[in-house]
Image (spheres, grey):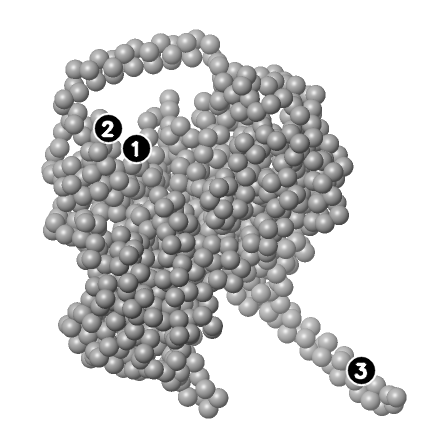
Amino acid sequence: MRNSKTQFTRLSLLSFLLVFSSITLSAQEIDLLLKGGQVIDPKNKINAKMDVAIKDGKIFRVAANIPSNSAKKTVDVNGLYVTPGIIDMHAHVFQGNDLGSYIANGQTAVPADAFTFRAGVTTVVDAGSSGWRNFRQFKAQSIDRSQTRILALLNITGNGMYGRFEEQDKTDFNPEMTSYMITKLFPKYIVGIKAAHYWGDFTQVDRAIEAGKLANVPVMVDFGEHQPTNSIKSLFLEHMRPGDIFTHTFAYGPNDRETVADAKGTVKPFVFEAQKRGIIFDVGHGGGAFFWRQAIPSIQQGFKPNVISTDLHSDSMNGGMKDMANVMSKFLNIGLTLEEVIERSTVNPANVIKRPELGNLSVGAEADVAVFSVKKGDFGFTDVRRYVLKGTQKMDAELTIRAGKIVWDLNGVSGMAWDSPEALK
Amino acid sequence: MRTYFFKKRNQLFSVSTAICLFFASAANAQEIDLLLKGGHVIDAKNKINSKMDVAVKNGKVFRVAADIPASSAKKTVDVSGLYVTPGMIDIHGHVFHGTQPDNYLSDGLLALPPDGFTFRSGVTTVVDAGGPGWRNIDVFRKNIVEPSKTRVLAFMNIVGHGMRGIEAYEQDEADMDAKLTGAIALKHKDIVVGIKLAHYIGHDWDPTDKAVAAGNIAKIPVMVDFGKALPPLPLEDLLLKHLRPGDILTHAYRYDQEFDKNGKMLEHKQAIVDVKTKKVKPFVWEARKKGLIFDVGHGGGSFMWSQAVPAMQQGFQPDVLSSDLHTGSMNAGFKDMANLASKFLVLGMPLADVIAASTWNPAKVIQRTDLGNLSEGSGADIAVFRLREGDFGYIDANGMAIRGKHKLEAELTLRDGKVVWDLNALSAPIAK
C-alpha cells in the first residue's frame, strides 16, 4: 500500500524529530533537580554532597554538580539531607468504621497518607491488620485509594486483627489459604506474614512459618501476651528462620513478654546469636512497645535494631511514637549515626521484605525521595510509659517525593514566590 | 551494671517513700491536679494577654493568676517562654470519615478521622462543615462524635445526604428540605451548631434561602461555601440580601477563575478583593459591619496569597481561622491549624488576634460560649504553643510561596484536663 516516497518522507521526518528532541532533551532533560543536599543512600554507599535528578518519575542521575539549566525545575536543598523515601515496615492502615473491630477495618487503624509523607515515608507495610478473608476489602478501601505505596504482611488469622478473642482461634490459622493469597493472587502487595497477639504456645508462630515456607516470604512475629511468657530463645533459635522478623524488640512486659535485655539491662547472649543467625529485629514502637530501659542499654552494648518502624495506629500517633521522623530522631539521640538510622529505614526494610527495588536512589529506581532537616536544640522524647529522654537533634521531613511528584513540602522550598512576576502572570 | 541498677533501685525506693510521706502531709495543700507555670496566657474572652499560671482541677480550669505556687499542685509543668491559650476550635473540618466508596465527604474516604489532626496542632474542638445531612447525622454521631477524643460538632448540610458528591447529590434541590433539616438539627442540638450550604452550581437562590430558613427554625447560623455557579450569583446579594448577621462566608480568601473560549475571565465565586484594583470590595466592608462572619476555610483550593495579602494590608482580617481539613488539603498548603495560624502571623496579624480568631471568635460564632476560653470552671481544653523564630516558608492553595520569620508549634494539648499531645515531653517524668 505504501509507496516508497511517503515512507521516505516519514523516515526523514522521524529522524528530524529524533535529532531535534535529543537537542532539546540535553537542554532540559531533567524534570526535577534536588540541588546541593547531602545524599545518604546506604545501598549505594553514598554519604556525600550530591545532586539528585528525577525524570519521568524515576531517579535519572545522582552526581555532584548537575547543572540547573538541565532541569525544568530546581529545588535548593542546601543544608538538608536527601535520602530514599522512608519505608515504615510496621504500620496499621486498614482503617474503617466497623465499631466492633479492633484494627481490621476498625478505628484503631489510620489512613496512611495522613501520617506518611509528612514524616518522609513513601512506603508502609501494614503489619497484619488483614487476613486472607478481608485482604480484598483492605485493598479496595486503603491500598487502592492511597498515594502512599502500601504493602502488607497478611495475618495468619483469617480475619486479621479483628479483636483479641478472635485472634486466639487456632482453627483459623490457615497456612494454605494464607499462602495462596500471596502466591496465586496478590504477590504484588503481600510481602510476608504476621503472627501476633496469641496467648497460647508456639502454634500460631509455627503455622505462620509454615505459610511463610509455602509462599517463600518472611514472617513477622509480635510475641507477647503469653502468661507465663514463652521463651524467646526458643523462638529465635528453634522456630524462626533467618530473615524472619521479631517486632517490638524494645518492649518491656516482663510478665507477659520476655525481654531482649535482662533485669540488669544486659542484652541476653542468645539475642546477639539470633541476630547473627539472620533474625531481623524490628522496632515497632507503637503505643506500648518501646522502653528506654530496653533500648538504651541495648544500643550501648552494640545491639542495634535491623529495622526502625512505627507500629502506627490511633493509640500510638499522639503518644510517644508520633510519627516515623520522631522515632528515627530517638535513635539519633541514643547513639545511632544518621547514616545508620537511614539505613534501618530504607535499604534494610527493603531487603527484609524482598523488595530490593525500594529504599535506594539507584538510577532507574522509582523516585521516592525524602529530604530531611536535622534541627539542633533542646528536645524531649518519651517512651510508651511517658518517660522522657532529652535530646539535641530532631529530624523534620522538609520535602517528600513519591514517584517523582512532590507530595509534601513543609517550608515551601519547591514553591514559586507568590509575588514573583511569573506567579502574577 | 549490677551495682548501678542496684543503687538506682535503692534510690527509687527512698524517693518513693519520701513522696508518699509528702503526699500524706500535704494532701490539703495540693488541690490542683495540673499547673501550667510561667507561660504567657492569651484568653480573648477574659481579655488576658500576659504572663500567668493556669491551674487545672477535675478536668476544669480552676484558676488563672500570676504566681500560683507549685506546692499547691500535684504536678507542675514549666511552660515559660510558651503561649498558653484555650484549645483551638476549628469550625471547618471534614471528619465524617467512612469507607463508602463514592461518598466524598459524607461517610466517605476523603474525610479524615479527627484525632490524628487535632491535638498535634492545638485543636480540641472540630466542627464538621456539612459532611452529614439529616439522613445520616445519626451515623455521624455513632461513628465520629462518640468514638473521638476530640470534641466533634457539625454544621448539618441543607442537603439530606450531606456532601455525598458535588456533581449529583449536592445539586438535588428536592433533597433540600428546610423544615426537616431545621427539625433534625434541633433534635441533635448538642452536636449540630449550624447549617451548611456548599458546592451548589445552579443559578438561583432557593438553596441559600432554604439553608437560612433551616437556620431560623433551629436558631443557628448558616455557613455558605459559595459554590460553583457560572455565571456566578452576585456575592454582594448573598451577603447583603440573603444571609443574616452571624451567618458565615467560608473560603473568604479564595479566588478561582476560569477562562471561556474567547479568553474572557469567569469567576465562580466572586473574590472579596477586586482582582484588578486589589481593593477589598466596598460591599464586603458593609457586610462585615452588618455582622457577617468571614471564615478562612483554607482547604486544598481556597486560600490564595493574591487575595489574602492585599486584604490583610487593607486591614481586612478574618473573623475565624479554619482548616477545611480533608485528604486534599492535609499534605498541601494547609497542613494543620498551627501552620495556618502561622500564615496569618506572617501576614502581620497580631498573635493575640490569631488566637482569638481560633478560639473565642469561633466559639461565639457557633453559639458555644462555654468553649474557647479559660474562664474558671470551663472544661480544661488548653493548648500550649511555641513561637519558633527562623526562616520558614508557607504555600497557598496554588503552591505559591511566602517567606516568614515565625512558626507556631503545638507543644502541649489538654482535653478536659488530660494531656493528649506533648511534642517535647514537657509533662513527662525524667527517665534517668
Looking at the picture, do discs 3 and 1 lie on one chain? no
Q: Is residue B19 left or right of residue A17?
A: left
Residue at (26%, 40%) from the top-left corner?
Answer: B416
Task: Indicate the quadrant where residue A154 lies.
Answer: top right
Say which residue label 3 marks. A11
- How far apart, in angstroms, are the residues tagged by discs 2 and 1? 9 Å
The chain letter under disc 3 is A
Residue B335 in percent (x, y) is at 39, 55
The chain letter under disc 2 is B
Residue type, mark 3 in image: Leu
Q: Are marks 3 and 1 in contact (CB under 8 Å)?
A: no
Residue B151 in percent (x, y) is at 31, 48
- How far apart, in angstroms, are the residues tagged by discs 3 and 1? 74 Å
Disc ID at residue A279 = none
Say which residue label 2 marks. B75
Residue type, mark 2 in image: Lys
Looking at the picture, do discs 3 and 2 lie on one chain? no
Question: Between A413 and A69, which is closer to the camera in this rendering?
Answer: A413
Question: Between B121 and A144, which is closer to the camera in this rendering?
Answer: A144
Crowding at mark 3 (Cα within 10 Å: few <14, some 14-19, many 20+): few
The chain letter under disc 1 is B
Q: Is residue B269 above or below residue B223?
A: below
Question: Between B81 and B108, which is closer to the camera in this rendering?
Answer: B108
Looking at the picture, do discs 2 and 1 lie on one chain? yes
Disc ID at residue B427 = 1
Under tag 1, what secondary structure?
Answer: loop
